[in-house]
Amino acid sequence: MSDRILEHLFDSAIKVKLLKLFVHNPTTIFTVDEIRRRTQASGRPMLRELGKLLTIGFVRIREARASNRHSQGRVAVRRTKAYVTDPSFSLYPEIKNLVTKPWPASRDHIVGRLKTLGRIKLVLLAGIFIGSETSRADMLIVGDQLRERRLRDFIASLEAEVGKELTCVALGTKDFQYRYNMFDRFVRDMLDYPHEALINKLKV
């Protein structure tokens, strides 16, 4: 029985995103629209994989309220089907242990995407990327001419892969250097506590 469950759990990339989302947010009730937004997964494949998780008992159905704002400004509230993690699922502890390990993403892939955001001088990974729960932020990006829209899209795609909202801080080079020289607490904590430097042109 457990072998068949494992086959259902890890048979697609979309399902892995769903597992991460529900494990990292065990008490959050998600509507279908919220799940689609958070995982950046397309409708039908996502619904199919969500149905499999429901079938094996990893998630439960709950009722939620969703609001729609009409063009006239009126807000309509409707009841809708939503999903929440079932912590009593037989393999939940094992899955949680796997999902919450430091994120094994390709560092080269991340660096390649970062270089499209602007003139990047420094990138530090901490928090979820190294398995630390005490980090001030998950990622610090320092650079110039940062493309804000691309930066937002980049962070959103990382959050979809990781399964939780990330704390990412972006600073201009002059701002960072000023904070560094003034012994800014946040900057010092990011540098003094465990982290991984993906890019370090500033030699800090």
Image (spheres, grey):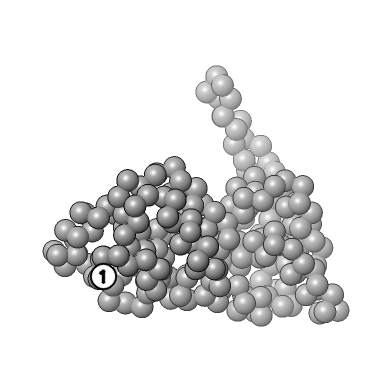
User: Which is more toward the observer, 76 or 192?
Assistant: 192
- The vertical placement of 33 against 204, above or below, is above
Position of residue 82 measured from the top left corner of the image (x, y, whole percent): 68, 51
Query: In which image quadrant can residue 183 be found?
Result: bottom left
Query: In which image quadrant can residue 65 be found?
Result: top right
Q: Residue at x 65, y 49 (%)?
A: 36
Quadrant the N terminus occupies: bottom right
Give SS at disc 1.
loop
User: Which is more toward the observer, 34 or 10?
Assistant: 10
Q: Viewed as shown, does residue 46 lie left or right of 69? A: right
Quadrant the C terminus occupies: bottom left
Mark 1: give few (<14), some (14-19) or many (20+) Cα within 10 Å: few
User: Which is more toward the observer, 157 or 32?
Assistant: 157
Residue picked out by circle 1: 203
Q: Residue at x 46, y 75 (%)?
A: 130
Position of residue 86 measured from the top left corner of the image (x, y, whole percent): 69, 67
The answer to whether residue 165 shows anywhere in this view is no
Looking at the image, the residue that sits furthest to the left is 182
Looking at the image, the residue that sits furthest to the top is 72
Q: How many marks on residues? A: 1
The answer to whether residue 71 shows anywhere in this view is yes
Position of residue 76 measured from the top left corner of the image (x, y, whole percent): 61, 30
In the rendered structure, which amino acid carries the disc numbered 1?
Answer: Lys
Q: Which residue is drawn at 54% across and 71% down?
A: 103
